[in-house]
Amino acid sequence: MSRVRILRAGLCTTIQDRGRKHLRHLGIPVGGAMDLLSHELANRLVGNPGNAATLEMTLTGDEIEFVDDPLRRAAEYELPAVGRTLLPVADFDGQNCPSYGKTVSAARLIAITGADMQPVISHADGSQRAVAQHCPIVIRSGGRIRFQAARRGCRCYVAIAGGINVPIVLGSRSTLLRAAFGGHCGRMLAAGDELPIGDVSESSGCLMEFLTQDSEQTSPIWQPRWFVRPEELPNSDIATLRIVPGSHASWLITSEWGNLQDIHFVVSSQSDRMGFRLTGRQLTMTQREELQTEGVAPGTIQVPPDGNPILLMADCAPTGGYPRIGHVITADLGIAAQMRPGQSVRFVAVTMEQAQILVRQQRDRLNRSITGMQLACGVS
Amino acid sequence: MHKQQPATTMTIEPLGDSAVIVAWRSLDDSSAWRTVQNATAHLIALQIIGVDAVTPAFKSLTVHYDPGVIRCNEVEKRIASVRLEVPKQEDQIYSPIEFPVCYESEFALDLDAVAVAHALQPNDVIRIHCGTDYRVQMIGFSPGFPYLAGLPQELHTARRQSPRLRVPVGSVAIGGNQTGIYSLETPGGWNIIGRTPVRLFDPERDPPCLLTAGDRVRFVPIDRVQFDEYRGPA
């Protein structure tokens, strides 16, 4: 079994897929990747289905290593290829390969998206290289990737061809920290954890072969000179999130709703996968009615009695009882997920029609990028 | 057979660009609840393409959809086209699920405060709490947490001024006019009057939640020894 090993843990690294959409009636949050678009892009770049489990690193990344079971390695991996000829299984022992006279070892196809954590690969001989993001890359087994503090953005996604193959719990591999289930033992990853990797798809195999066809086998990493243009990370000065009005938008005093785009909030340190507490401006509500508990969703902006809004995120409860002044549109939830504590944010209202056009355009862009890559790499 | 009353008081409003809330806020609690349960079943049965989930709450339900697949106004149109009615009062024949609860002071952190608030003895609070059947209105707040309706008026108690950061799992508590059971260790502001050894939520179990909306629940007092010896439902 091939595995990824955590050598040093980041601040909050969890395993996530698209989450559990169908269990809200049991009080179970949807969960899943906070920045679904970066998660999806990482998966598609390595030939995975969009729902395969990835690593979600937060603010500070991990140091990871790919390890193989030597006995099964030959059967599991077709790489590396010499020219376009696959190595005979019998010669593929991971050390010396007499018939070709070169040292080879098994390799892994991965992609890194989202926050820029300045990943660096180091190899046994001590050499180091920057690792490209937003493109498929091939890493030799034994290669270690060190992720550092995020220079931009907050959450970085690492997809591995085959996906992280932890057990499915209640229909998903996503970690739900609050209820301590899913992912790896229901918790954040820690140094020493080893995660199994699933079977590699045919298109992943084709991509690997394409990427490595002209390169030196001794290199610890193969990466292309191109990348797929990612969706933008939030502006580090002030992020702008587009919203549609909520049921209780009219409860805000007129001057606040009318000038919402001029109000700068700050993402407080009390922010996690459940939601972001926003400070900097206490909103004034004209009504103080106790509300019945009703449905909420990631993106919902609630205003509790203290007036500091809460932007609900992936792990939010399926229901809530505070007034809902607005909802971040689906197309901007990825930007929201990339906001860091201490950063400023403002909200700009759009119409429902605009919101629904934006989400479709965003998905079209991703699909076009992936189709383009597949054509260029000869993957059908 | 009673004639069914049409649910004319229904409102449909968007909840962001990926969900709509269908609500019956002007109906009384009991009628609204029955309507929500009935409507949830109807809307699930429609199997609208692009709709991920239909989730009931107290006086409303939420239809979650994928905005990349179906538009908000199409979802609203489909909901509005369904003839949703207020079902008649349900039959009174049911068998409640019994929950053993240890009301001893070690677990009942707020039992004395609840008793004092109502000028009762702690034993009276226990007797009243165990003397009636409750209906699961919805599962929410955290995985498997049942909101139970039917708390006798003399036990209605306001939530605590400052919520506890960690309420032990299994805590049986009173919040306003409802009672509930903490299915996980979470923060919580309800008044804790006892603890059940029954595990309400287990992600390894199918279904993971012991209770579902509509179930009936009755509490049965047990002592500390019985609590420790509890080995699951017989």
Image (cartoon, rainbow, N blue to C red):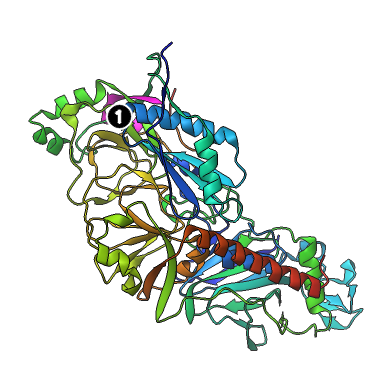
Structural crowding at the residue carrying mark 1, measured as other residues with C-alpha within 10 Å and reported as few (<14), some (14–19) or many (≥20): few
Name the residue located 22 percent from the left edge and 59 percent from the top edge. A306
The picture places residue B41, in percent across and down from the top left corner, at: 51, 31
Task: Tell me which segment is drawn in magenta.
Answer: B214-230
Left of A131 or right of it: where is B113?
left
Residue that appears at 13% across and 36% down: B112
Within the magenta stretch, is there residue A250?
Answer: no
In the picture of the structure, the residue carrying the numbered disc 1 is: B28
Q: Quadrant of residue B226?
A: top left
| Residue A191 visible in the picture | no
Q: Is B226 contained in the magenta span? A: yes
From the viewer's perspective, tell me whether residue B8 is left or right of residue B149. right
Q: Nearer the viewer, residue B220 or A229?
A: A229
Residue B145 spot, x, y in % from top left: 38, 39
Please count the marks in the image: 1
Dividing the picture into quarters, in which one does residue A244 lie? bottom left
* Nearer to me, B10 or A146: B10
The answer to whether any part of residue A219 appears in the image is yes
Amino acid bearing label 1: Asp
Q: Nearer the viewer, residue A298 or A119?
A: A298
Chain of the residue on which disc 1 is drawn: B
